[in-house]
Amino acid sequence: MVKLDILSDPICPWCYIGKAQLDRALEQVPDHPFEVEWHPFQLNPDMPPEGMDRRAYLEAKFGGKEGAVKAYAPLVEAAEAAGVELNLEGIARTPSTLDAHRLIHWAGIEGRQTAAVSSLFRAYFREGRDIGDREVLGDVADGIGLDASIIQRLLASDADIKEIRDRDAAAREMGVTGVPTFIVAGRHAVPGAQPPDLWRRVIDELKAGAETT
């Protein structure tokens, strides 16, 4: 197996598209060598716990409504080309993702990490749910087979907050400035939402290398 580490944030639309395209490649090559692990990277590490109004967030980030529309145009085109459903109009708030990253971490302990990531993307980008809300996170946990009552108790505590923040900071110290960032075999960084063809070539090269060793 080859480790594929993915740095991502569940409110990052390019991460959502990148995952969908990676998934497509892995479905096409079911005997792929990848063992996937997800790692935390917060787009907005200083976001208050309650989050903020999404329109206000986007206009502040991109310098007004026109700037936000212009910035999102390539994203909408890329999502359509990739066959990824984005219900951007349905998103009312931009949340803090600290708790969502904690849920992904706990799901990983139970072998449900990718399921958690998929469910969070769907909840946010397709259903317009506030994934900073702990009740929503409990529903996500329940939907992937975790004990929601345990998850709620953990969310109400400080469990693993420092670990998530430390791992986020470590990624930035390594030079990661944006997500998604894919790291193949602990050595090769692949930034951005890459098409399935690229991933199939990577898999072919890894298989060829394994056959010659």
Image (cartoon, grey):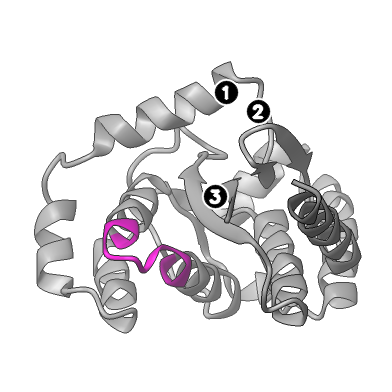
Residue shown at the point (57%, 68%) measured from the top left: 91
In this figure, which residue is indicated by the disc labeled 3?
A: 9
Dot 1: few (<14), some (14–19), or many (≥20) neighbours within 10 Å? few
Residue 134 is tagged as none
**Label 3: which secondary element:** loop
In this figure, which residue is indicated by the disc labeled 1?
A: 172
Residue shown at the point (68%, 79%) measured from the top left: 30
**Quarter of the figure with residue 182:** top right
- Tell me the kind of residue under disc 3: Asp
- Magenta region: 107-116
Residue at the top extreme of this rendering? 173
Q: Position of residue 163 (x, y in %)?
A: 30, 32
Q: Out of 37 and 116, give the one closest to the viewer.
A: 37
Please indicate, yes or no, whether residue 80 appears anywhere in the rendered image.
Answer: yes
Q: Position of residue 131 (x, y in %)?
A: 41, 63
Residue 176 is tagged as 2
Q: Position of residue 86 (x, y in %)?
A: 70, 75
Residue shown at the point (70%, 45%) measured from the top left: 59
